[in-house]
Amino acid sequence: MKITGYRVENYVMQMDRSIADANNPVGDDLMPASLLWIETDEGISGIAPGGGDIEQFFHLLEGEDPREVVGLWRKMVDYVHKGGLVASGGPIAAIDIALWDLKAKIAQEPLWQTLGALEGRTKAYASGIGYCLSDDELFAFYRRMAERGVDGGKLKIGLDMTADLRRIGIMREALSVASDRPHLMVDVNEYWSPKQAVQAMHEIEKRYDITWIEEPARRWDYEGLASVSRRIKAAVATAENLRSIGEVYPLIHNEAVDIVNVSTATTGFTGCRQVANMCYAYELPVSMMNCQANYMAHLAAALPNHLAMEVVDPGREHCLRFDNTIEDGFIVLGDAPGLGIEVDEEALHQLQAHPPERKSNFPFARREGAGLYVKEPEVGEVPWK
Amino acid sequence: MKITRMESTLYVFDQDRRMGDANSPAGRIKGSGCVVELHTDEGLAGIGLGGGGVRPQMQAMVEQLLVGQDPRRVQGLWKRMVDKHFKGGHDGLINDAISTLDMALWDLKAKANGEPLWKTLGGSKQKIHCYASDIGLPMSDADLEAWYRRMATEYGFCHAKLKVGLDQDADLRRLEMMERVFKERTDAPMLYVDANEYWSPKQAIRKVSEMEERCSIAWIEEPARRWDYLGLRRVKEGVRTAVCAGENLDTLGDFLPYFQHRAADVIQVSYGMTGISCALQIADAAFGYELPITLGGSPGLIHAHLATVMPNFMTLEVPDPVVRDGVFTSDIEIVDGWAILGDRPGLGLEIDREALEKQRVDAIPAGSGPSPFGRRPGAGLYEVLPTAAEQAEAAKGVSA
């Protein structure tokens, strides 16, 4: 089997609802998106949500056997040695994902089995990414998840302590049908300084038992993160904005992180697994970041130290069909070969033919005041104020 | 595909040279092993090599945890085996059992795909960097030189290792001999020395410093006890040579102090550390620390498969460029000083039934296999030179 070609399709993802965090509490429901196909001489294609400049790497892939995905990963990573992974991480991740999809399809098995998992399931937690949601909408989201057995939830916070405390309570109440003591997580997306984080968590922990606080300091600030971890009861979760295992290393070595957020951002399945294994050596749990169609659950299911995977479910799979569901609080993967994702080409064509008229706000810029002072939402910016 | 049962056979074989290290200067000439076969309902069998001392433990694990399971789900089955032994720990004898069964599971996973293990792991076929490992402390200078020369000329090795530790003058002399032989192959041979935990950290610093004045050494292996991360780090900081360690650790958790305290410059990995599954985890953790991996000696050189997916892989230990056991063949070959992977499905091992029947034994005889005599007196304290009786034994060579 040999790689013969590739195709990238770009479109604007129109989600069923907006998502928002402390940096952009208004949020957006439009997000630029891509799909990548890697084609072979035997008619099977590997699919990945993602894209970017694939051409720069294709000469490394052409004619190669896609089953040798880890070797090809190495070629790509070594190829961008000089420039590093910041600029090239996206396309490498997309290629790596499509190659793993191919590898599993060739073996005619779901990717979770190719990766050696015993079962195609992994624990889920609900993540609204809903700073733009009203209190009622917030309750409805978490209740809907709890009714599918999800017993943990994460809330975007950081701009308004009164509202944040109230909304944590709303999330807890919504999740209470799944558990008497649901796991409560909060996420501030690097909006605070370490001491702001310590003070805020001191207030929050008077009222609630918090499982983790996510990104309570800058992604690279291992001393700041470590100082937050030492001063609060909740775990510090971070790393979603890092791009390689080498960037994760100082956090681990300096005890700056208690739960490591892993994702495709560290060069796809291959790099993500490396980070997770390094965490395993340090007895650190990992938590898989959300993604379209939950495809990263395949890897999460195979990791011995995976805690729970983020499920946002904003309705963003309009041109995809996928075979996983949320049952009894777990993401349950099907037995379709590969990632279990199929593209609805007609729906994709319609999205491309009728793009939205306005531009998307993604990726969110950093909000004024970040790390310095809190710039509260203005009247009318969010429905909960 | 479902696992149905396990079969295991002990065997002995003759070595081509008298092997030993600082702990066993008299050496041994008999080798032993255990072939484990994990059978499935589809006729495929996975091969594991090892576990000769833990056959009851393996049998129990197969019956309780593996029968009826799909071997392609090896990572999950690995966790089952590890978690099962939570209380007592999955090191020691249990580690031997898990390692061997995990190897057989990976063999099956690759065979189920009809592809070699290196491809199942996702690796690209490549030449694997390797070195000739003498394990020949009992050998005379002349015999050892002949062996090195044969490795250099017949198999093309450019890099080699020397067992050291008991007699500094002899070690210096043999080190220079090894350098001389391999300099005929390359201007810059990588020369490794291995003390097998026979020294204290300060002994190691004194001895290695003296060796460094004679030639450039690529690493000193196990210059302190396996768990003594402080001692290993002292040596690391006390000499210019890299410190290589880890060979006798059993689990991923055992390596945590090495990483956190930066106790070693090169990390040794083998499938004997809770299996191929865990070897991959250790290598990833070391990769995060920018630490190179060296893969230890393995039956049929099967570690070469793993090298293809370890971005921080440095070199593979080769004690024997061809399989000496007799009871199986491997399709991994040494050509021009590199290990060359084959294309047979799985690990690339094939059992020679006739030879296995001939070499089969009911129990492993005393004095065969690695380190059969335990730790040598004086270890970590002072050097106990080979006695007259040990020298006489060693001088017999392979004629028992």
Image (cartoon, coloured by chain):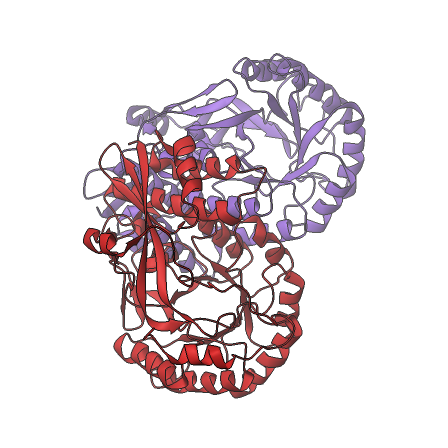
Chain colours: A purple, B red
Residue for point 41% across, 46% down:
A91
Q: Is residue A116 visible?
A: no
Task: Name the quadrant of the C terminus of chain A.
Answer: top right
B124 or A204, which lies in front?
B124
The x and y percentages for residue A175 are: 62, 16
- Residue B309 vertical position relative to residue B214 in the rendered view, above or below: above
- Residue A186 vertical position relative to residue B6 in the rendered view, above or below: above
- Residue B160 vertical position relative to residue B269 in the rendered view, above or below: below
B271 or B386, which lies in front?
B386
Is residue B259 toward the left or the right of residue B310 in the image?
right
Is residue B44 toward the left or the right of residue A86 in the image?
left
Is residue A112 toward the left or the right of residue B236 in the image?
left
The x and y percentages for residue B342 are: 24, 57
- Residue B248 vertical position relative to residue A366 in the rendered view, above or below: below
The x and y percentages for residue A166 are: 74, 19
Q: Is residue B256 visible?
A: yes
The x and y percentages for residue A122 are: 48, 28
Residue B187 falls in image quadrant: bottom left
Judged from this view, the residue extending furthest toward the front is B389
Badge count:
0
Residue B261 falls in image quadrant: bottom right
A287 or B166, which lies in front?
B166
